Image (cartoon, rainbow, N blue to C red):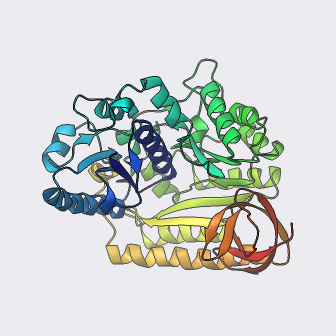
Amino acid sequence: MRRYFVWTVGCQMNKAESQRIAGYLDSAGYQGVNSLSDADLVVLNTCVVRQSAEDKVLGTLGLLKGMKDKHSGLQILVTGCLVNSDSEELERRFPHVDLLFKPGAYSDLIAWCERPGASVEQESLSYPLAALRASAERNNTSRPASPCAFVPIIQGCDNFCSYCIVPYRRGREVSRPLEEIVCEVNELARRGTREVILLGQNVDSYGHDLPGHPDLADLLNKLGSIDGINRIRFLTNHPKDISPKLIDAVASLDKVCEHLELPVQAGDNDILRAMRRGYSVEQYRELVRIIRRRISQISLSTDIIVGFPGETEEQFEHSLALVTEMRFDVVHAAAYSPRPGTVASREYHNDVPSEVKKKRLNKIEERQAVIAGQINAQLQGREVEVLVEGRKKGKWFGRSRGNKLVFFEDAGDWLGRLARVHIGRTSPWSLVGEVTK
């Protein structure tokens, strides 16, 4: 039996797609292993949203080339955002790669597995295509269910923010049928999953391309009635597309967690216009006010890009001031990284020096560490509900409904269970407590 390893870098969508790829390969007669060096087949699920991620991909491709030079039987497949429409150029750059397939193009993977001469078990070659697809859609039913599962609901993006490569690599928005998603989540619940995280580059656009135009709020209502599912989350949102109906759904549906990822990207209107984000700082601020008024316990996360081309010190200070004012629970900050093919890379050439980007990034992170520490300190002495996801260094860990990472020690088996945890210690990044029941 041939052995495979799926190497993944990037966003939650990549992680979800890697689960499906593993499902296909399991159904096709391959056996998963835990390292590159043990595999006969390696699948790289790539990300090029930032230069640091692309560097990891290129480094791993170089490592695999050396491995293949020594072991000619090694097969290498590449998917994810590295793979674009110019496959000939990629084939020229990486002749040691056996198959390049676009994100979500599972039919190409299936065809490769079923090609004449494929060295998998003969019995698996006749495995029906529909069964392979169903296996992957059920998040790989040959493996134990995770307490939490990623469920993609919409692929691609129509926004074309000036800095973002995603629409060029994943294409325009395509929603999955509502009934198909409900069927998958029902199956996940049957197998023991307790929390689903709905994924999309812009989940708020879900359904606009489907007959009848169901939206994300409609999907949340359907999923909220599934027995066995305790929690529902979704990401990533776009501030210009969040509707009052969706806010009401989060406020009223018991299973939908009080947590939203709401990327602002910048706190200066001129920078937001250059980014082509489609909203102003004032509109973002008003949206946050409405959400917090409607959902009193809401936890908010955001993304900030520092050092966008032409960003002045004053404009950066506007972003820093917005972080201070909004008091987000989590801020994912990153330095601007030019992506070839994007509007920003073509039209904006006044890049901010790397040492200035680093300084600004440190300022954001230091300010947010103080804010997060203050927010989390308010939970000391209180009890929170935690869905336990696993063990790390002898402690159980999981997340609260507000997406706080919580650790506790206990001799019992808490995997996949809801625990009530009394918080004894807090930090900007996690909480530690004792289980009460």
x and y percent of residue 230 in the render?
77, 47
Q: How many marks?
A: 0
Quarter of the rendering containing residue 180: top right
Q: Nearer the viewer, residue 305 or 196?
A: 196
Which residue is found at the position 26% from the left and 36% from the top? 85
x and y percent of residue 7 in the render?
38, 55
Q: Can residue 423 be seen by looking at this rendering?
A: yes
x and y percent of residue 52 in the render?
34, 64
Which residue is found at the position 69% from the left and 33% from the top? 219
In which quadrant will I find the C terminus? bottom right
Question: In the image, 340: left or right of 50?
Answer: left
Which residue is found at the position 51% from the left and 58% from the top? 265
In which quadrant will I find the N terminus? top left
35 over 117 or under it: above or below:
below
Q: Nearer the viewer, residue 120 or 100?
A: 120
Question: In the image, 213: left or right of 79?
Answer: right
291 over 56 or under it: above or below:
above
Q: Can residue 44 be seen by looking at this rendering?
A: no
Which residue is found at the position 83% from the left and 43% from the top? 252
Q: Nearer the viewer, residue 101 or 395?
A: 395
Quarter of the rendering containing residue 397: bottom right
Quarter of the rendering containing residue 358: bottom left
Q: Nearer the viewer, residue 95 or 122?
A: 122
x and y percent of residue 280 in the render?
57, 51
Question: In the image, 414: left or right of 206?
Answer: right
